[in-house]
Image (cartoon, grey):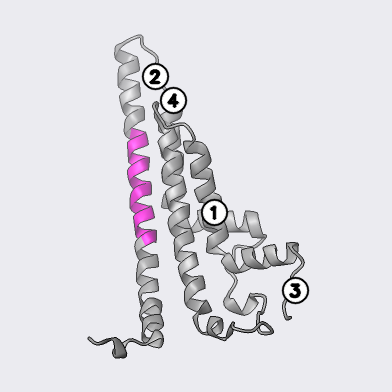
Amino acid sequence: MDASAFSIDIALSNLSAAFGSIETLVKALSYIIGLTLFVRGVMMYRIFATQTLSSAQKGEIAGPFVFIMVGALLIYFPSTLRASLTTVFGTGDISGTQDLISYSGLSGFEKWDAIKDVVIKYMYLIGLIAFVRGWVILSKMGHSGAQPGSLGKGLIHVIGGIFLVNIVDTFNLLATTLGYTGGT
Protein backbone atom coordinates (compact mmCIF):
# COMPACT_ATOMS: atom_id res chain seq x y z
CA MET A 1 0.00 0.00 0.00
CA ASP A 2 1.56 3.27 -1.05
CA ALA A 3 1.00 6.67 0.50
CA SER A 4 -0.79 8.00 -2.59
CA ALA A 5 -3.62 5.47 -2.01
CA PHE A 6 -4.60 7.12 1.28
CA SER A 7 -7.67 9.28 1.13
CA ILE A 8 -9.43 11.13 3.92
CA ASP A 9 -12.77 10.08 2.44
CA ILE A 10 -11.84 6.39 2.70
CA ALA A 11 -10.58 6.88 6.26
CA LEU A 12 -13.80 8.63 7.31
CA SER A 13 -16.01 5.98 5.73
CA ASN A 14 -14.01 3.22 7.48
CA LEU A 15 -14.36 5.02 10.81
CA SER A 16 -18.09 5.44 10.28
CA ALA A 17 -18.51 1.78 9.35
CA ALA A 18 -16.77 0.61 12.54
CA PHE A 19 -18.79 2.85 14.84
CA GLY A 20 -21.89 0.64 15.13
CA SER A 21 -19.89 -2.46 16.00
CA ILE A 22 -17.86 -0.68 18.67
CA GLU A 23 -21.02 0.82 20.19
CA THR A 24 -22.61 -2.64 20.37
CA LEU A 25 -19.44 -3.99 21.99
CA VAL A 26 -19.51 -1.29 24.69
CA LYS A 27 -23.17 -2.00 25.44
CA ALA A 28 -22.55 -5.77 25.59
CA LEU A 29 -19.62 -5.23 27.95
CA SER A 30 -21.80 -3.08 30.20
CA TYR A 31 -24.36 -5.91 30.41
CA ILE A 32 -21.66 -8.46 31.24
CA ILE A 33 -20.00 -6.21 33.83
CA GLY A 34 -23.41 -5.40 35.33
CA LEU A 35 -24.36 -9.05 35.62
CA THR A 36 -21.00 -9.88 37.18
CA LEU A 37 -21.31 -7.09 39.75
CA PHE A 38 -24.87 -8.07 40.56
CA VAL A 39 -23.95 -11.74 41.11
CA ARG A 40 -20.91 -10.68 43.16
CA GLY A 41 -23.12 -8.56 45.42
CA VAL A 42 -25.61 -11.39 45.92
CA MET A 43 -22.80 -13.83 46.70
CA MET A 44 -21.29 -11.37 49.18
CA TYR A 45 -24.66 -11.20 50.96
CA ARG A 46 -24.79 -15.00 50.97
CA ILE A 47 -21.34 -15.19 52.56
CA PHE A 48 -22.34 -12.45 54.99
CA ALA A 49 -25.44 -14.40 56.04
CA THR A 50 -23.43 -17.62 56.52
CA GLN A 51 -20.80 -15.83 58.63
CA THR A 52 -23.41 -14.06 60.73
CA LEU A 53 -25.26 -17.27 61.54
CA SER A 54 -22.13 -19.22 62.43
CA SER A 55 -20.36 -16.57 64.52
CA ALA A 56 -21.02 -13.42 66.47
CA GLN A 57 -18.92 -11.16 64.24
CA LYS A 58 -20.28 -8.14 62.44
CA GLY A 59 -20.36 -7.88 58.67
CA GLU A 60 -20.64 -5.03 56.20
CA ILE A 61 -24.01 -4.54 54.52
CA ALA A 62 -23.16 -1.50 52.35
CA GLY A 63 -20.50 -3.20 50.20
CA PRO A 64 -22.71 -5.84 48.61
CA PHE A 65 -25.49 -3.28 48.21
CA VAL A 66 -23.22 -1.03 46.12
CA PHE A 67 -22.31 -3.97 43.87
CA ILE A 68 -25.97 -4.90 43.40
CA MET A 69 -27.04 -1.31 42.64
CA VAL A 70 -24.23 -0.59 40.18
CA GLY A 71 -24.76 -4.00 38.57
CA ALA A 72 -28.46 -3.24 38.12
CA LEU A 73 -27.65 0.18 36.62
CA LEU A 74 -25.28 -1.41 34.10
CA ILE A 75 -27.69 -4.24 33.25
CA TYR A 76 -30.28 -1.59 32.42
CA PHE A 77 -27.66 0.51 30.60
CA PRO A 78 -29.93 2.11 27.94
CA SER A 79 -32.50 3.15 30.56
CA THR A 80 -29.79 4.45 32.90
CA LEU A 81 -28.23 6.48 30.10
CA ARG A 82 -31.60 7.86 28.96
CA ALA A 83 -32.53 8.84 32.53
CA SER A 84 -29.16 10.55 33.00
CA LEU A 85 -29.53 12.47 29.74
CA THR A 86 -33.05 13.54 30.72
CA THR A 87 -31.77 14.73 34.08
CA VAL A 88 -29.01 16.86 32.56
CA PHE A 89 -30.52 18.05 29.25
CA GLY A 90 -34.27 17.74 29.85
CA THR A 91 -34.66 15.13 27.10
CA GLY A 92 -33.38 11.62 26.54
CA ASP A 93 -32.80 12.27 22.85
CA ILE A 94 -29.32 12.76 21.48
CA SER A 95 -29.00 15.78 19.21
CA GLY A 96 -27.65 15.40 15.70
CA THR A 97 -25.12 17.52 13.88
CA GLN A 98 -27.89 19.56 12.27
CA ASP A 99 -28.55 21.09 15.72
CA LEU A 100 -24.93 22.22 16.14
CA ILE A 101 -24.36 25.96 16.18
CA SER A 102 -23.03 26.87 12.75
CA TYR A 103 -19.51 28.02 12.07
CA SER A 104 -20.12 28.68 8.39
CA GLY A 105 -19.10 32.33 8.63
CA LEU A 106 -15.62 31.55 9.92
CA SER A 107 -12.76 30.89 7.53
CA GLY A 108 -11.06 27.49 7.52
CA PHE A 109 -14.04 25.50 8.73
CA GLU A 110 -15.00 23.94 5.39
CA LYS A 111 -13.16 20.78 6.34
CA TRP A 112 -15.10 20.65 9.58
CA ASP A 113 -18.35 20.13 7.66
CA ALA A 114 -16.88 16.98 6.09
CA ILE A 115 -15.72 15.36 9.33
CA LYS A 116 -18.09 16.65 12.03
CA ASP A 117 -20.37 13.60 11.85
CA VAL A 118 -17.47 11.22 12.48
CA VAL A 119 -16.05 13.38 15.28
CA ILE A 120 -19.43 13.62 17.00
CA LYS A 121 -20.00 9.84 16.69
CA TYR A 122 -16.67 9.11 18.30
CA MET A 123 -17.27 11.64 21.07
CA TYR A 124 -20.50 9.72 21.69
CA LEU A 125 -18.53 6.48 21.83
CA ILE A 126 -15.96 7.94 24.24
CA GLY A 127 -18.87 9.18 26.35
CA LEU A 128 -20.38 5.69 26.50
CA ILE A 129 -17.06 4.22 27.59
CA ALA A 130 -16.55 6.94 30.23
CA PHE A 131 -20.10 6.42 31.53
CA VAL A 132 -19.57 2.66 31.98
CA ARG A 133 -16.09 3.19 33.43
CA GLY A 134 -17.46 5.67 35.94
CA TRP A 135 -19.97 3.16 37.24
CA VAL A 136 -17.27 0.49 37.49
CA ILE A 137 -15.08 2.90 39.49
CA LEU A 138 -18.04 3.66 41.76
CA SER A 139 -18.64 -0.06 42.29
CA LYS A 140 -15.17 -0.33 43.83
CA MET A 141 -16.48 1.80 46.68
CA GLY A 142 -18.39 -1.32 47.73
CA HIS A 143 -15.50 -2.96 49.55
CA SER A 144 -13.13 -1.86 52.23
CA GLY A 145 -9.75 -0.63 51.13
CA ALA A 146 -11.09 1.49 48.27
CA GLN A 147 -8.66 4.14 47.09
CA PRO A 148 -9.22 7.67 48.33
CA GLY A 149 -10.77 9.79 45.63
CA SER A 150 -12.58 6.92 43.93
CA LEU A 151 -15.95 8.55 44.53
CA GLY A 152 -14.88 11.80 42.87
CA LYS A 153 -13.18 10.02 40.00
CA GLY A 154 -16.22 7.82 39.37
CA LEU A 155 -18.64 10.75 39.45
CA ILE A 156 -16.47 12.78 37.08
CA HIS A 157 -16.43 9.86 34.62
CA VAL A 158 -20.22 9.43 34.83
CA ILE A 159 -20.96 13.16 34.45
CA GLY A 160 -18.32 13.63 31.74
CA GLY A 161 -19.69 10.60 29.91
CA ILE A 162 -23.18 12.10 29.96
CA PHE A 163 -21.86 15.36 28.52
CA LEU A 164 -19.89 13.55 25.81
CA VAL A 165 -22.78 11.29 24.81
CA ASN A 166 -24.77 14.39 23.94
CA ILE A 167 -21.82 16.52 22.84
CA VAL A 168 -23.91 18.64 20.48
CA ASP A 169 -26.20 19.91 23.24
CA THR A 170 -23.22 20.29 25.57
CA PHE A 171 -21.42 22.42 22.99
CA ASN A 172 -24.54 24.47 22.28
CA LEU A 173 -25.09 24.96 26.01
CA LEU A 174 -21.54 26.24 26.48
CA ALA A 175 -21.73 28.43 23.37
CA THR A 176 -24.99 30.02 24.50
CA THR A 177 -23.66 30.50 28.02
CA LEU A 178 -20.59 32.28 26.67
CA GLY A 179 -22.70 34.43 24.35
CA TYR A 180 -21.90 32.83 20.98
CA THR A 181 -24.91 32.58 18.66
CA GLY A 182 -23.29 31.47 15.41
CA GLY A 183 -22.18 33.26 12.29
CA THR A 184 -19.38 35.78 12.20
Image x and y of residue 64, in percent: 40, 32
Image x and y of residue 74, in percent: 43, 50
Q: Are marks 2 and 4 in contact (CB under 8 Å)?
A: yes
Q: Which residue is mark 3?
A: 181
Classify mark 2: helix, strand or loop. loop
Amino acid tagged 4? Ile
Q: Residue furthest top?
A: 56
Q: Which residue is mark 4?
A: 61
Q: Which residue is mark 2?
A: 59
Within 10 Å of disc 1 (Cα), the crowding (few <14, some 14-19, many 20+) is some
Compared with 182, 141 (above or below) is above
Q: Which residues are magenta?
A: 26-42
Q: Is residue 127 left or right of residue 19?
A: right
The residue positioned 37% from the left and 41% from the top of the image is 38
Q: Nearer the viewer, residue 61 or 117?
A: 117
Q: How many marks?
A: 4
Classify mark 3: helix, strand or loop. loop
Nearer to us: label 3 or label 4:
3
Q: Nearer the viewer, residue 51 or 107?
A: 107
Distance of mark 3 from mark 4, alpha carbons? 52 Å
Q: Is residue 40 left or right of residue 67?
A: left
Position of the C terminus by quadrant? bottom right
Nearer to us: label 1 or label 3:
3
Q: Which residue is mark 1?
A: 160
Q: Which mark is residue 70?
A: none
The residue positioned 45% from the left and 35% from the top of the image is 66
Q: Are marks 1 and 3 in contact (CB under 8 Å)?
A: no
Amino acid tagged 3? Thr
Compared with 86, 149 (above or below) is above
Distance of mark 2 from mark 3, alpha carbons? 57 Å
The residue positioned 64% from the left and 54% from the top of the image is 87
